[in-house]
Image: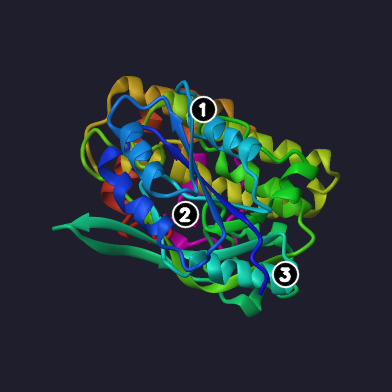
Amino acid sequence: MSSPLVTVIIPVYNLAPYLGNTIASLVGQTYPNTELLFIDDGSTDQSLNLLEAAAEKHANIRIIQQENAGQGVARNKGIEKATGEYITFVDGDDWIEPETLERAMDAAVKENAEIVCFGYRIVKKRDEKPEVLYQFEYDPSAFINADPISCFLAENTPGKEVLNTATWGKVYKRSLLEAHNIRFRQRVFEDSPFMLEAVFHTKKLVCISGCLYNYFLRSNEGEASTMSSGFREDKAALFYQADQQMKLFLISKGVWAKYKNDFMRYHNARVIIYSGYFELYRNGGAVSKEAYRAFIKLLQKNSRDLGWEKASLYDTYGKRIPVLHVGLFLSRISPWLAHRYFSTYEKKWAFDKPSSAD
């Protein structure tokens, strides 16, 4: 097998407690030809010192510094500075298995693939030992003749032809990104629009078996990640913005009619997960007037894109789409009435727990 250079792009912002594990997993890859490109996004802790110490020991580590601008900007900077023929992304508190790049590049070269996808685990630390909360693994045979866009939009369904829409867990041919100017368009919820553009333009996508990426779910108070933190109006607004970007992209490419129903199903589930509904109502805690009013205001503002499509979704999400519509109707009478309905539904009528695919 030939060994094209692979650039691993790692954004870092105040990740000093976790960087050692990430660095060890990257310098310990069985694939020999790697460039490790760390983008320090204005860290104020010891992250930069740790990176500089690692760079003294490992010649393939490069460090780029920027003022704090968010993960999307940091990743874009990495794409611009990368020299590898292929690119992959690893978050600065995650790690990959030793054979990850070797297996992904073996598939990329043999299949002449522009995107190679691999499975992942969601893990947390308990007594310094990883605890697996959830794992997702591809069935490579399911994607041989599959439509990549349909697979992308099948997220949050239990089917076999489902792509993880996060940016990580893939290797990309850099020429694909450059030819179509595929970049991250915002600070938060930047992954999905990037991935949609990539799968739309790719001529060859393959999936390999195995859970090779480890996504570290930080749960300590005050250190929650973007996707696991409590409700914030600005974050929820950026979620809606990201989904609007994807809708407009499909329209601009003349394929909206083909994928409209699939997209609406995809979007409806994401409203449940990311707009604040789960964060405000799922755990049964107190919800401030300010928070529920902000959530409902955003729901009303984006109500045109809230459809009824729920076929094939995990039941956890599908059963709540009518709930959202009822709450939206009640919110026209009174935001408090909608808030009480959502709270009551979760406390008295919803007996399921979130799917492990949340």
Residue hosting label 3: 146
Q: What residue is shown at x 76% (from left), y 56% (from top)?
A: 202
Which label lies toward us, 1 or 2?
A: 1
Disc with the residue nearer the chain's start (1 vs 2) = 1
Q: Identify the amino acid type marked 1.
A: Ala
How far from the left and from the top, in percent, is residue 315?
46, 61
Mark 2 Cα shell of 10 Å, populated few (<14), some (14-19), many (≥20): many
For the N terminus, which image quadrant? bottom right
Q: Which residues are magenta?
A: 305-326
Front in this rendered view, residue 237 or 339: 237
Residue most toward the bottom? 141
Q: How is the image coloured?
A: rainbow
Q: What residue is shown at x 81% (from left), y 49% (from top)?
A: 257
Callout 2 secondary element: helix
Residue hosting label 1: 237
Which label lies toward us, 2 or 3?
A: 3
Disc number for residue 293: none
Residue hosting label 2: 317
